[in-house]
Amino acid sequence: MPNMREIRERISSIQQILKITNAMYLMSSSKLKKARKSLEATEPYFYKLQSTIESVLEHTPHTRQLFFDRRTDIPEEKRKKGYIVITADKGLCGSYNHNIMKYTEQELAKAPSPENCYLFVMGQVGRMHFQNSIRKGNAAALDAEFLYTTQNPTLYRAMEIAELVLKKFSEHKLDEVYLIYTNMINSNVQENKTVQLLPFSRRHFGKAADGTMKKLPKASFVPSPEKVMEYLIPQYAKGIIYGAMVEAFCCEQQSRMTAMDAATNSAKDMIKDLSLLYNRARQAAITQEITEVCGGAASLQE
Amino acid sequence: MAKTFHLEIIATDRVFYQGECEHLVITAIDGLLGILAGHEPLVTCLPTGELKYMVDGKWKYAAISEGFIQVMPDSSIILADSCELPEEIDIKRAEEARQRAEEKLRQKQSIREYYQTQAALNRAMNRLKISQKHFK
């Protein structure tokens, strides 16, 4: 029979943890509400942007635009691939971080030459993870100066990131850029997703979720297709990155909420089991004492 | 009643306007552009500027920052970073942003920073201008 004091200490420590997880649950649920709201506000833009760009591109005359350049002269194993990975800033959110990092590693494994992969990791947890894996000899390079948080996504942050990758692309420091983030299908199902950001190709525009695809007869571009594209592509990159950031942040809060809810529940279960054990131990102790007293009294009488 | 076309103005944080419109005037990168129903298909970019559209014979104004427009004969879509009505503009905030940007412009900056500050200044000035013009 375990010691009563031990059990009591254990129960009180679990209660402390329960308080923490419960507080985190409440916090993440209020944050989730906010994130959901901003996700709902951004979604129309995000989808419209994709469908509009798609229909615009269908009518774009073939331009020798920098961001369309597929650089087919560079062989597959020498292509420099950049990956923007969106992870969380903090742990304790179930398998959210684990999933996205594992997925990223799988993506990296697909690349023919890991030394030409460059990681741009948003969020503290992902950055720490990849720093460690580089130290262990994983060959992908991590951009150490790419320090962005994933908390409360802003358009400004998305713009900075978009500018950075577009600049690297135009300087030939990167030949392909991918964006890896967690997509929210519904509140229980999340999915990791890769989007090719650069070079811009016509085929990677999947159908937008709302399915609005309006056929545009031949459109004119004012002042010129090149000028419009020069302006449109950074705009598009910014929009996509922002949308992904909002989506990922919402997923993070969702998984944290679920994880904390589960933790609170199992803490409650543990307390229940332990208090049963405690009561039993106490009862046993009392019974034993009574037996002892009775035994003592009986021996005195004799 | 004039012929109308469907207009959608979508900002990153909300759907600003969705509905019929008779006449739309935008500031494109090379000047003002008026759009009526049946306009030829067109794609162009919108810098930070003013936008006005006519609904039921009344002009409505808005401050818009960076986006693009896709025009089709029977509909138009504007996608922009932000879009606000004159009465929604926070003058104090815009004024602060303007001062901050001006302060920054006086300091030494990299070219990239310089452009960013300039764009921020542009946005602030545009907001102030539009709210002063249409909302007193």
Image (spheres, coloured by chain):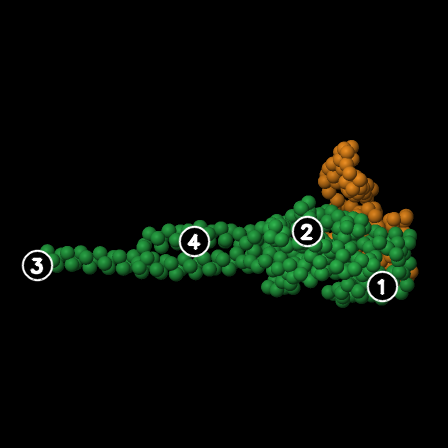
Chain colours: A green, B orange
Q: Which mark is residue A302?
A: 3
Q: CA distance from mark 3 to mark 2?
A: 87 Å
Q: CA distance from mark 1 to mark 2?
A: 36 Å
Front residue of A122/A103: it is A103
Amino acid type, label 4: Ile
Chain letter for mark 1, please. Answer: A
What crowding class fits label 2: few (fewer than 14 Cα within 10 Å), some (14-19), or many (20 or more)?
A: some
Instruction: Write down the residue under mark 1.
Output: A58
- Whether the residues at callouts 1 and 2 have beta carbons within 8 Å, the answer is no
Sequence-earlier tag: 4 or 2: 4
Q: Secondary structure at mark 2?
A: strand
Chain letter for mark 3, please. Answer: A
Q: CA distance from mark 4 to mark 2?
A: 42 Å
Q: Which mark is residue A14?
A: 4
Write the residue at 82% across / 46% down. B48
Chain letter for mark 4, please. Answer: A
Amino acid type, label 1: Glu
Q: Which mark is residue A141?
A: 2
